[in-house]
């Protein structure tokens, strides 16, 4: 009877250990998906800088855990697209600011010459 008790304790400890390991690995795997989901939410809300930070964090989590290459490639492509979008918006704002400054400063020499001719 005592040997069966030892076997039962050993099996119970093994199952408990396996459950703990599964929970730890499962929560680590979900960290990158949560970051990705948060990045999507921020991107849809127009918070591109926050979304970029979330995507980069998710990418580093995937690198650490050595997970799915397809998901890694998808996030890397999102980062490239988002960086292009951020650069475009910055250039657009700079151009709009320059146009506002020129409009408030009055006509330039070129505009004055065109008005005369």
Image (spheres, rainbow, N blue to C red):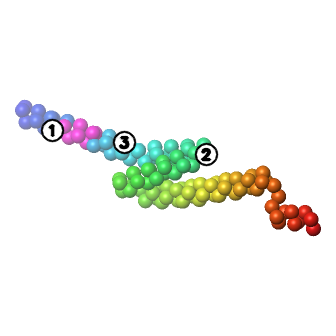
Q: Would you call the spot at circle 1 few (<14 residues within 10 Å), some (14-19), or many (20 or more)? A: few
Say whether residue 115 is left or right of residue 30.
Answer: right
> Considering the image in quadrants, where does the C terminus appear?
bottom right
Q: Can you tell which of label 1 and label 2 is closer to the viewer?
A: 2
Q: Would you call the spot at circle 3 few (<14 residues within 10 Å), some (14-19), or many (20 or more)? A: few
Q: Is 11 one of the magenta-colored residues?
A: no
Residue 60, position in %: x, y?
40, 54
Label disc, if present, on residue 46 of the rendered structure = 2
Visible residue check, residue 32: yes
* Residue at left offset 86%, top offset 63%: 112
Labels 1 and 3: the sequence-earlier one: 1
- Magenta region, mostly helix, strand or loop? helix
Q: Can you tell which of label 1 and label 3 is closer to the viewer?
A: 3
Label 3–label 2 contact, CB within 8 A? no
Q: Nearer the viewer, residue 73 or 53?
A: 53
According to the picture, the residue beneath numbered tag 1 turns out to be: 10
Visible residue check, residue 44: no
Gap between marks 3 and 2 measured at Cα? 28 Å
Say whether residue 39 is left or right of residue 12.
Answer: right
Labels 1 and 2: the sequence-earlier one: 1
According to the picture, the residue beneath numbered tag 3 turns out to be: 27
**Which element type, helix, strand or loop, lies under badge 2?**
loop
Q: Is residue 3 above or below residue 52?
A: above
Q: Image quadrant of residue 59?
A: bottom left
Residue 91, position in %: x, y?
65, 58
Residue 1, position in %: x, y?
7, 31
Q: Would you call the spot at circle 2 few (<14 residues within 10 Å), some (14-19), or many (20 or more)? A: few
**Which element type, helix, strand or loop, lies under badge 3?**
helix
Q: Is 15 one of the magenta-colored residues?
A: yes
Disc tally is: 3
* Residue at left offset 49%, top offset 49%: 53
In the image, which residues are magenta? Answer: 13-20
């Amino acid at each position: 009877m005592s040997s069966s008790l030892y076997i039962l304790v050993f099996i119970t400890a093994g199952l408990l250990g396996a459950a703990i390991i599964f929970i730890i690995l499962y929560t680590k795997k979900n960290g990158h998906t949560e970051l990705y989901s948060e990045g999507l939410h921020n991107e849809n809300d127009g918070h591109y800088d926050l979304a970029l930070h979330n995507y980069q964090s998710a990418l580093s989590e995937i690198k650490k855990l050595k997970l799915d290459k397809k998901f890694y490639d998808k996030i890397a492509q999102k980062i490239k697209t988002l960086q292009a979008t951020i650069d475009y918006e910055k250039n657009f704002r700079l151009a709009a600011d320059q146009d506002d400054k020129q409009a408030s400063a009055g006509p330039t020499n070129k505009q004055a010459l065109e008005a005369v001719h």
